[in-house]
Image: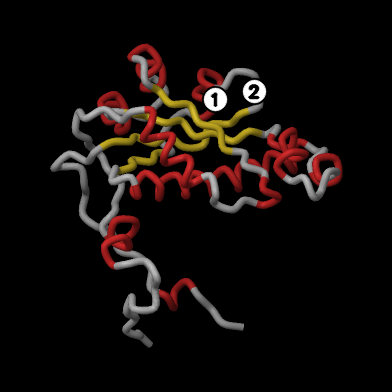
Amino acid sequence: MTIDVTTSGLVLDEQAQSLLFREARTANAFTDEPIGEETIRTIYELVKWGPTSFNQQPLRVVLVRSPEAREKLVEHMIDNNKEKTRKAPLVAIMGADTDFHENLPTQLPFLPNAKEMFFSEYAVREDNARLNAALQIAYYIIGIRAAGLAAGPMSGFDAEAVSEAFFPGGKHKALVVINIGKPAPNAWWGRLPRLEFDAVHSVV
């Protein structure tokens, strides 16, 4: 059964809904307009409030600005992603810190023994880091859209090689590369379909 759902029950106005979700799409081409440090700082100051389990905040970000670093990253992208990564105004490598637990004493002060109690095993930390960094990456994409920019998130790259090149020390794992900028006129592919409510939800 299909039910006509309006947006009247949402607090966010129609324009904001479209900016963040309905009209927003993965960008494949960008204008040459640069993305300054202040813009990224503003985005982070918004998205850092997104929830993570145990307030663990494992996301670590490398902003790739220099031509040398850009070419080093492009080397590890799959062919279809090389040129758009080379041309994007800004590229961010999003990684997960598997030693996030070292920050828990200050980030979870009401549970001072959480580090030892829950995260002493590396496998547990890695699973938590990947899941919660992925949540933070999703918040980051919404934040980029909220700034009036477009995001081009990609998983098509050699994650091990990128981790080694940009996250030295082995404690951070590259998960997603995001191209960031103002969308060019030809930035979008056609809107792809989404699953309907009943295909996703069940009631018990």
Whole-Å distance between the Cαs marked 1 and 2?
A: 7 Å
Quadrant for the N terminus, please. bottom left
Q: Which residue reaches farthest top?
A: 68
How crowded pointer 2 is (Cα within 10 Å; few <14, some 14-19, many 20+) is rated as few
**Of helix, strand and loop, which one carries label 1?**
helix
Residue 22: % across, % down: 29, 61
| Mark 1 lies on residue | 163
Left or right of 120, for residue 161: left
Q: Earlier in the sequence, mark 1 or mark 2?
A: 1
Cβ–Cβ under 8 Å for marks 1 and 2: yes
Front one among 123 and 36:
36
**Of helix, strand and loop, which one carries label 2?**
loop
Residue shown at 47%/28% (left/top)?
A: 158
Q: Which mark is residue 170?
A: 2
Q: Amino acid at mark 1?
A: Ser
Residue shown at 70%/32% (left/top)?
A: 99
Quadrant for the C terminus, please. bottom right
Front one among 125 and 63:
63
Q: Amino acid at mark 2?
A: Gly
